[in-house]
Amino acid sequence: MLYLVIALLLAAVIFGPQFWVRYEMDRHAADRPDLPGTGGELARHLLDRFGLASVVVETTAAGGDHYDPDARTVRLSPGNHDGRSITAVAVAAHEVAHAVQHAQGSRLFGIRTGLARFLGMVDKVAMVILITAPVVMVLTRVPTIGLFQFGAALALLGIGLVVHLVTLPVEFDASFGKALPILQHENYLHPDDMPAARGVLRAAAMTYVAASLMGLLNFLRILRR
């Protein structure tokens, strides 16, 4: 019974955030013809309003909605770029908020960007260690070495989750310090739509944490096999 409770708690911790993020995004993604523009159009309008005409807005089929500080580009999924929904508008405002953080020289955003680059290298190293572990075990005939490699790969992937938790203030500032006031006080959305927008913005702030938890789960599945 204890093992069942522990398993259920772990499942809630790992699957809960991802399910909740997807649920919040999907339930407010219905087309709203009464909205004045699409997510992509709002992103372009806000960037111009904040004097960021050099920042590009484009669609992305992979990588999800994000702001790329190196390319100075706001990338939105097709549904959010071309969609006219609460989700599209809120996500577009969130990603534009990151561009504003970058333009304002936010120290926390700079730290987050540096850590994101670091995580890219960490993920590659973790995958190399993971892939070579069985080969090393066969060649050396020392299972302990292979188990040590698996442990090292797990620790490296765990760094990603820690980093995203540490940088949550950047995400919440983008959602509630910038995007929400813009949508609320400048009447881009009707007051009745603000609770839904808050839910989407909260989910947008938690996206990377939820993705990290799923990444750890996938690794554990590989380790079990």
Image (tube, grey):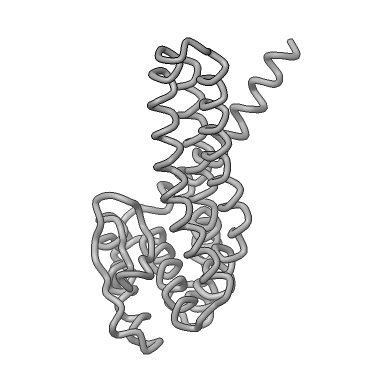
Q: Is residue 186 above or below residue 136?
A: below
Q: Quadrant of the C terminus?
A: top left
Up-down relation of residue 145 to residue 202 (above or below): above
Classify residue 177 as left or right of residue 182: right
Percent x, y of residue 38: 29, 68
Q: How many marks?
A: 0
- Residue 22 or residue 109, whichever sits in front: 109
Looking at the rendered image, the quarter that the N terminus falls into is: top right
Q: Tell me where residue 73 appears, x and y as whole percent.
A: 31, 70
Quadrant in the picture for residue 87: bottom left
Residue under the image location 42 percent in, 51 percent down: 120
Front position in the image: 88 or 71: 71
Task: Judge from the rendering whether residue 17 lies leftward or rightward of residue 71; answer left or right.
Answer: right
Q: Does residue 9 appear to the left or right of 96 in the view shown?
A: right
Residue nearest the observer in this picture, 102 or 139 = 139
Residue 47 rendering spot, x and y as whole percentages: 35, 81
Residue at image position (43%, 40%) is 125
Q: Position of residue 67 (x, y in %)?
A: 38, 66
Residue at screen point 47% across, 43% down: 211
Residue 61 is left or right of residue 17, and the answer is left
In terms of depth relative to the viewer, which is nearer, 201 or 192?
A: 201
The correct choice, above or below, for 123 with respect to 60 in the image is above
Residue placed farthest to the front in the image? 140
